[in-house]
Amino acid sequence: MTLSRTALYDAHVAMGGRIVPFAGYEMPVQYSSIIAESKAVREGVGMFDVSHMARLRVNGPGALAFLEKVTTNDVANLGDWEGQYSLMLNENGGTVDDLIVFKDTDDAYRVVVNASNHEKDVAWMRSHLPEDATLTDETDETVMIAVQGPTAGKLVAGASDRPEAVNAVPFFGSIEMLVFGIPCYATRSGYTGEDGFELVCAAERGIELWDALANAGAAPCGLASRDTLRVEAGLPLYGHELTDEINPITAGLG
């Protein structure tokens, strides 16, 4: 099996990241140590390459009805620049995937799904897609960096051209801005149980953003510490607490 690489791969190697196969990608499992990286996120600020997670756009007059059909949460409740955790279920109630839906404005939504389910999720969604909605996969054209920890918001706001707006973004809220002069779409979300932002920018500027965040004090962190942090926070992982055969009630998400 040929493994893919995110646009940040060279930066990981340059920083001494230990690379392992994960969900079809070559990803850094750790840099310093799991304990040190976990401590950085719990006490300060760390950053993770989460570009392997799939980033999808759903647009068109039928976008809302489509997302209401294929996800379990009530997308109609979202205001502009708001998001929600949700699930996609199969005909038997098993979990196709867990995901986050973000609304930009009317008829314009973004969906983030798990890397291990990327192709399956896109196929599932396309099988239900109406003629008045479009589904665009932007995963390969972008990178996503999770900046996490109690001082993550301060770092991102300080690097932004819209610091006051950044500070006002609620959990699962989103914003478009410049970060270190780089156009970014950002959501106040993460997978660590800490405050933070997930930053999406064009792939060709990904290493520039990664290096700028590191120079500003964000510690590079790998998949191992991310898994430790999410377990401590009680967050489910597809393939463990969620599968095609586990329904939301059994998983404690009902």
Image (tube, rainbow, N blue to C red):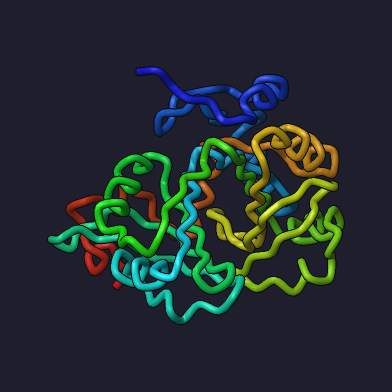
Tell me where residue 247 sits by quadrant: bottom left
**Left or right: where 66 falls relative to 215:** left
Look at the picture and state if 164 lies above or below 128.
Answer: below
Tell me where residue 1 sits by quadrant: top left
Q: Position of residue 161 (x, y in %)?
A: 86, 59
Q: Position of residue 60 (x, y in %)?
A: 45, 65
On-image quarter of the C terminus: bottom left
Residue at the bottom extreme of this rendering: 77
**Left or right: where 102 falls relative to 184:** left
Tell me where residue 155 sits by quadrant: bottom right
Look at the picture and state if 127 lies above or below 118.
Answer: below
Q: Nearer the viewer, residue 184 or 197?
A: 184
Residue at 53 percent of width and 36 percent of height:
140
Look at the picture and state if 141 lies above or below 86.
Answer: above
Q: Nearer the viewer, residue 32 or 177?
A: 177
Residue at 44 percent of width and 25 percent of height:
21
Residue at 50 percent of width and 63 percent of height:
109
Q: Nearer the viewer, residue 50 or 204?
A: 204
Residue at 64 percent of width and 44 percent of height:
145
Q: Position of residue 178 (x, y in %)?
A: 80, 53
**Left or right: where 246 falls relative to 49:** left
Residue at the left extreme of this rendering: 92
